[in-house]
Image (cartoon, grey):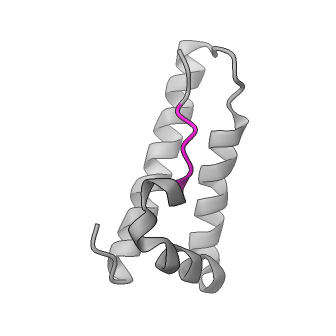
């Protein structure tokens, strides 16, 4: 089973300027975004144990949900 390693900006190109602004001005947002990237980069190209892969996916999804909520509060139309 492969892990989907899409970058957050690629998933949300319409709000890229807002993402970059929040990343520069909001330390919590920047930390979450970096965690999102780290989890994506942490997964090796080869298959992982299903439990480990599932845990990584859950962590990444929780972070993505929080990032999206922050973007919505900042005015993004997601």
Residue 77 to residue 39: above or below? below
Residue at left offset 44%, top offset 45%: 61
Measured from the top left, where is residue 62 in percent x and y? 44, 49
Measured from the top left, where is residue 57 in percent x and y? 50, 34
Measured from the top left, where is residue 76 in percent x and y? 34, 77
Q: How many marks?
A: 0
Residue 24 to residue 77: above or below? below
Q: Report the front residue among 24 and 56.
A: 24
The magenta-colored residue range is 4-8
Residue at left offset 52%, top offset 33%: 4
Residue at left offset 68%, top offset 30%: 43
From the viewer's perspective, is 20 left or right of 34? left
Residue at left offset 56%, top offset 83%: 21
Residue 41 occupies quadrant: top right
Measured from the top left, where is residue 69 in percent x and y? 36, 67
Which secondary structure dominates the residues rendered in magenta?
A: loop
Q: Report the front residue among 50 and 77.
A: 77
Q: Is residue 3 magenta?
A: no
The quadrant the C terminus occupies is bottom left
Q: Residue furthest left?
A: 77
Residue 32 to residue 45: above or below? below
Q: Is residue 7 magenta?
A: yes
């Amino acid at each position: 089973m492969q892990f989907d390693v899409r970058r957050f900006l690629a998933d949300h190109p319409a709000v890229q300027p807002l993402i970059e602004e929040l990343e520069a001005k909001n330390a919590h947002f920047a930390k979450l975004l970096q965690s999102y990237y780290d989890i994506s980069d942490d997964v090796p190209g080869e298959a992982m144990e299903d439990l480990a892969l599932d845990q990584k996916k859950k962590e990444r999804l929780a972070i993505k949900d929080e990032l999206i909520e922050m973007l919505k509060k900042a005015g993004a139309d997601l």
